[in-house]
Amino acid sequence: MRPRSELVDLDSTRWYHCTQRCVRRAFLCGRDPYTGKSYEHRRGWLEARIKLVSSVFSIDLGSKAVQANHFHLVIRIDRDRATTWSDEEVMRRWFTLYPGTKSELKVNPKSKKDRDSNAKLIAEWRHRLWDISWYMKAISEPIARRANKEDGCTGRFWEGRFKSQPLLDDGALIGCMAYVDLNPIRAGEAKSLEECDFTSVKARLSAYRKEKRRAALDGRRVMVAKATPEHLIPMPLRCATDVERGVKDTEDGFLPISLESYVELLQWTAEMTGDNVSVMRRPKRGLAMKLRSLGLNPNHFAQSVISFHQLTLQVVGSPENIRAEAKRRGMRHLMGARKLADFYCAA
């Protein structure tokens, strides 16, 4: 197994899909069919922890889903932001999660040795605050300890180390986010986006509708920041046609499509899950054009997203980008180029 330092390269991409799964029959959330015991309250534990850790680290959250025995995150690493923080800001953030480490700092400011030791320690904390492994560790470890305490047991709660997939382009990002947001529907836990509890899409829809009502009462336009949950990265609320008409947003989103178009994309894909998986309905013309503009095949997008979990992908991206990533790693090939060919080829 390759070390994480070789799998995460910010020169290739800042976006990663991370998954952490419980060991054997351990339950993160949901109801145990053998004992009838409910673990639903643990979803709240994990969601609160994800929000806290994301507010501390220089890592942005694009998408999330908390399932019965695993969770998904789509994240963006922002190393540059961490380098701009003062030493005091680094310490404030680090102590929010690890207050016990305050004792590691030397207390004699007149001693050059102590000052150098503190500077080295703060530099290490700064690095950890944009490190993907420390981010996942900060989320997972407290949940494992709390769940083991509740279950009255010791030992592993998580199934080894977490899995991470680099997302090499916008198509990979949109496809992976759609897969994550639709997890409850694919698992049969929900029938609509509004029922997809503990997902980013439900949080985004709720925040957007609240801001839309407030904006209507105040006689102003909807603002991106106010229509976005605090723990998630903003998405554009308007289509390119709105910008062409002179309606501009000062706040940048991270996707080349609007929230409205993204929700439409999810609803269309959701219609082809479960019992309807064999009924492949073509998307509306506008949605198909948006997918083609991203280099994605509208005739294969939904099926690829639905079966994403069945693909053994080391990285996600266009065949060209996957081959370039393999070359960068000094490898002949990476799994994924052939499996994703239909996903990217224009119809």
Image: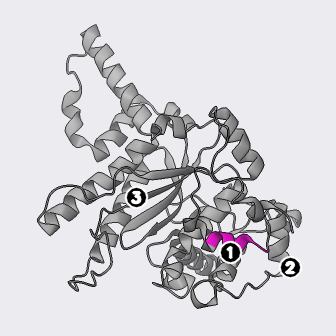
* Residue type for callout 1: Gln
Question: Picture coordinates of residue 6 (x, y %)?
Answer: 52, 35
Question: Picture coordinates of residue 211 (x, y %)?
Answer: 58, 74
Residue with the mark numbered 2: 285
Asked whether residue 235 is in view, the answer is no
Q: How is the image coloured?
A: one colour
Q: Quadrant of the C terminus?
A: bottom right
Mark carried by residue 20: 3
At horizontal 60% and vertical 64% (from top left) the residue drawn is: 177
Q: Mark 3 and mark 2: span between their CA atoms? A: 37 Å
> Magenta part of the protein: which range?
299-305
Magenta run includes residue 301: yes
- Which-is-in-front pick, marks 1 and 3? 1
What is the residue that sits farthest to the bottom in this orientation?
275
- Using a 10 Å C-alpha cutoff, classify the residue at mark 2 as few (fewer than 14 neighbours), some (14 to 19) or many (20 or more): few
- Which-is-in-front pick, marks 1 and 2? 1
* 38 or 278: nearer the viewer: 278
- Which-is-in-front pick, marks 3 and 2? 3
Q: Classify mark 3: helix, strand or loop.
A: strand
Q: Mark 1 and mark 3: span between their CA atoms? A: 24 Å
Q: Is residue 57 left or right of residue 291?
A: left
Looking at marks 1 and 3 on the same chain, the residue that comes earlier in the sequence is marked by 3
- In the rendered image, the vertical position of residue 262 relative to residue 78, given as above or below: below
Q: Classify mark 1: helix, strand or loop.
A: helix
Q: Is residue 219 left or right of residue 139?
A: right
Q: Quadrant of the N terminus?
A: top left
Residue with the mark numbered 1: 303
Disc 1 and disc 3 in contact, CB within 8 angstroms: no
* Residue type for callout 3: Gln
At horizontal 34% and vertical 48% (from top left) the residue drawn is: 137
Question: Picture coordinates of residue 233 (x, y %)?
Answer: 57, 58
